[in-house]
Structures are given as structure tokens and as C-alpha cells.
């Protein structure tokens, strides 16, 4: 009879185990091994996951720092981009002359009307034309004197007759004086002869005076220049008959001097003084002439409320009497900063400007404006001229704004 003999095995301690027990042990050992591997695998995964999380955190921190830095740079760039660029000027101080603009008519400063001062007569010749220069005593026109010449000749003959009578009377008196000592002639006769001689001498003087009068009258027949100057008008022709007291035959500008009779309002007239400089520009020309005020009107026209400021000018052919001209008359000068009109703002508080301080911040500065010139507006109070003044766009700025100033060319 066969019997199955179970396999017997011994453990490390020498115990005997059956096959089933050995398999159970093997299964348990396998299970324990599998559990260890699972735990190790789980532990490795946990370590990897933890490491990944740490790496992610580190990367996140780094990214955050980078991004934070980038945002700061961008923000700084944005802030820098938002700072406005403004043009500024440093006006300094200039010598500015104020002036009043007026207009008026050109004329001769000292016009001399010249006419016939004698008996008159027919004009034989005219020796000057308009625009000619003449000297004092120069003959302007010659008047016929044929009748007056004969009268003068007759009077000269009368002078000779009177002188002959006077010579005869003197001779008679001389002879009588020689005979009176001998008793041939009485003293009464001598006195009579002396009286006759004196009367004859007196007649000579009367005749000579009449001759001189005729000669003077004849000399006045010609039209003479009373002073040197420029002939402005001529209103006489050859053959014309003139007489004393008639209309002027010539008008002469004494010395060729001209003037502008500028009409000025009464308020402006009060600001002017005799001797003030003036610049005159006639209509139709770009030339300018310098002169000075030599007379101010003592009265004001009740209707126009204006007076005259008479500006003396030296002769120039471009200055034609009767022409229209404008004048800029100086009223004084000041030293002050001069700003363009765009730099000066106005509101309810008055005039002001914006200046840029040393920190490049905008500050408001109240000013008082003065003279207005072609170069700009003077600032009488509020600026020294060393400030950086905002040139334009002041209406878009506010007190304390940060700006980037750029000094502009004064010509701009």
C-alpha cells in the first residue's frame, strides 16, 4: 500500500513545515514584499511631488519678482512718459521805449507866402519853379518897370536942379559976406541970402529923398525871396498883372524844413513832451524818417477831443506837403522783462505767468503788465527776468505740475 509521504521542510529555526504552510509563508512574504515596494513607490512619488511643488514655488517666486520688477520699470516709464514737455524762456531785462501812434498831414514847418509888395505891374519873367532851392534876396519874378524908370529919371533931374539952386545960393551968400565988411551990403541982406541958401539945400534933400523912394519902389517891383528855402508852389505866369496885396505868388518852405501835424487824443497828448523823439512813415513808402516834437497844441478840439503834436523833420524829397503819414512818438523808456503775449494768462485775480522752479515744478506768479511793443509785452512788476517762464500752453498746466522744461529760442 502506497502512502503519500508529505514533504517536510524546516525553517531557519529547524521547525518542520508542510507544503501548504510553506506556500502560505511564501504568499505572505510576497505580500509583504509587494507592500514594501508599494510603500517605496508611494514614498518616491510623494518625494517627487513635493520636490515639484517646491520647484514650482521657487519658479513662481522668481517669476513674481521678475514681473514685479518689470511692472515697476513699466510704471516708471509710464510716469516718465506722462511728464509734459513745455517750452520756457528766460526773458532777462530789456530797455524798452514806449510810444504813441498817431497820424496826420505833412506840411512845411515854416511856410513863407511871397507876393507883390510894391505897386505891381505886368510880370516879365518868372525865374524859379516849384521844387527849386532859393537863397535870401534871390529874384523870383521880374515886374515891368518902364513907367517907374522914367519917373525915377525925372526925379533924378529934379535933384540936379535943386543942387544947382543950392550951389547958386551958396555963391551969393559967399559974395555977400565979403561985401558986408566993406559996408556995401547990409546984414539984413546977408541974412536973406543965407536963408535962400538953406532953402535950396533943403530942396536938394527933398529931391534926393524922393529919388530914393522911387528907386525903392522900383526895387520892390521884383518878387524876392524873403529867406532861403524850398519853393513849394508857384501861382504866377509871364504876362500876368499883379498888384500889392494880391494872393501869394509863391510859397517857400523856410530852410526846407517839414513837419507832421499828428492828431493825438487828449489823454495821449498829456503824456508827450516837447523834444520827444518820433519816427514818421509817409503813406506809399517803406522809408522811415526821424524827427522830434517841437510844438504841442495848447488846446483840444471840442468835437474830436484831439490835439496836434507837431513833429519837425529835415528836408527829403519823399516828404511831400499835403501827404498823409503815421508817426510813433516816444513817451519814455523802461528796463523790464519782455514776454510774448502767449506767456501771459489772465483770470479773475489778474494777470499771471507760470514759471518752472528748480525742481521742474510749475508755479504761478502774479504780474503787472506795462508797455506793449512789437517785441512783446513788458512786465512792470512780478518778474526779475531770471525766471524760466512757460512760453505757451499755460492754460493746460496747474500749480505744482511736474514738467520737463525746454528752453526755446526767443525768435520762436
Image (cartoon, rainbow, N blue to C red):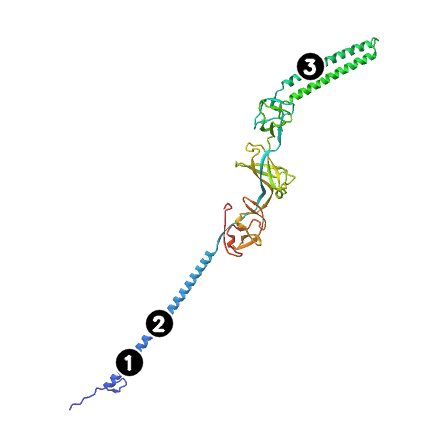
**Where 195 sits versus 358, above or below?**
above
What kind of element bears circle 2?
A: helix
Query: Depth-wise, is mark 1 or mark 2 nearer the camera?
Result: 2
Viewer-proximal residue, 77 or 224?
A: 224
Badge number at residue 157: 3
Badge number at residue 49: 2
Label 1: which residue? 31
What kind of element bears circle 1?
A: helix
What kind of element bears circle 3?
A: helix
**Do labels 1 and 3 touch, CB within 8 Å?**
no
Q: Residue at x 64, y 18 (%)?
A: 147
Callout 2 crowding tier (Cα within 10 Å): few <14, some 14–19, many ≥20: few
Residue found at the far bottom of this picture: 1
Query: Depth-wise, is mark 3 or mark 2 nearer the camera?
Result: 3
Quadrant where the N terminus is found in the figure:
bottom left
Answer with left or right where residue 344 lies relative to residue 31: right
Counting residues from the N terminus, which is met first, the one under dot 1 or under dot 3? Answer: 1
Q: Residue at x 40, y 64 (%)?
A: 63
**Where 99 sits versus 239, above or below?**
below
Q: Quadrant of residue 235?
A: top right
Q: Position of residue 232 (x, y in %)?
A: 58, 29
Q: Residue at x 74, y 13 (%)?
A: 165
How many numbered discs?
Answer: 3
Amino acid at each position: 500500500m502506497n502512502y503519500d509521504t508529505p514533504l517536510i521542510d524546516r525553517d531557519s529555526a529547524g521547525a518542520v513545515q508542510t507544503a501548504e504552510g510553506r506556500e502560505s509563508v511564501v504568499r505572505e512574504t510576497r505580500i509583504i514584499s509587494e507592500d514594501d515596494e508599494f510603500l517605496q513607490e508611494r514614498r518616491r512619488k510623494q518625494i517627487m511631488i513635493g520636490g515639484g511643488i517646491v520647484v514650482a514655488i521657487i519658479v513662481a517666486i522668481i517669476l513674481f519678482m521678475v514681473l514685479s520688477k518689470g511692472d515697476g520699470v513699466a510704471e516708471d516709464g509710464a510716469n516718465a512718459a506722462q511728464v509734459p514737455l513745455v517750452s520756457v524762456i528766460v526773458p532777462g531785462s530789456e530797455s524798452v521805449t514806449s510810444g504813441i501812434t498817431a497820424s496826420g498831414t505833412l506840411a512845411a514847418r515854416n511856410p513863407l507866402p511871397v507876393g507883390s509888395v510894391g505897386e505891381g505891374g505886368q510880370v516879365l519873367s518868372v525865374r524859379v519853379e516849384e521844387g527849386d532851392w532859393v537863397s535870401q534876396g534871390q529874384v523870383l519874378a521880374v515886374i515891368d518897370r518902364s513907367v517907374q524908370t522914367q519917373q525915377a529919371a525925372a526925379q533924378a533931374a529934379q535933384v540936379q536942379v535943386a543942387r544947382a539952386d543950392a550951389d547958386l545960393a551958396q555963391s551969393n551968400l559967399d559974395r555977400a559976406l565979403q561985401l558986408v565988411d566993406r559996408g556995401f551990403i547990409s546984414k539984413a541982406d546977408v541974412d536973406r541970402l543965407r536963408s535962400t541958401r538953406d532953402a535950396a539945400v533943403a530942396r536938394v534933400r527933398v529931391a534926393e529923398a524922393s529919388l530914393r523912394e522911387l528907386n525903392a519902389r522900383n526895387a520892390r517891383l521884383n518878387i524876392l525871396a524873403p529867406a532861403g528855402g524850398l519853393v513849394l508852389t508857384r501861382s504866377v505866369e509871364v504876362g500876368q498883372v499883379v498888384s500889392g496885396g494880391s494872393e501869394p505868388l509863391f510859397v517857400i518852405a523856410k530852410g526846407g524844413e517839414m513837419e507832421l501835424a499828428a492828431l493825438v487824443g487828449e489823454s495821449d497828448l498829456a503824456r508827450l513832451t516837447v523834444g520827444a523823439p518820433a519816427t514818421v512813415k509817409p503813406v506809399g513808402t517803406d522809408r522811415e524818417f526821424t524827427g522830434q516834437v517841437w510844438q504841442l497844441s495848447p488846446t483840444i478840439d471840442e468835437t474830436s477831443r484831439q490835439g496836434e503834436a507837431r513833429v519837425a523833420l529835415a528836408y527829403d524829397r519823399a516828404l511831400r506837403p499835403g501827404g498823409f503819414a503815421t508817426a510813433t512818438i516816444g513817451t519814455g523808456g523802461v528796463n523790464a522783462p519782455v514776454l510774448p503775449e502767449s506767456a501771459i494768462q489772465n483770470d479773475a485775480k489778474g494777470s499771471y505767468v507760470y514759471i518752472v522752479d528748480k525742481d521742474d515744478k510749475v508755479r504761478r506768479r502774479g504780474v503787472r503788465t506795462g508797455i506793449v511793443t512789437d517785441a512783446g509785452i513788458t512786465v512792470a512788476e512780478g518778474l526779475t527776468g531770471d525766471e524760466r517762464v512757460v512760453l505757451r500752453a499755460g492754460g493746460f498746466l496747474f500749480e505744482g505740475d511736474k514738467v520737463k522744461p525746454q528752453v526755446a529760442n526767443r525768435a520762436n
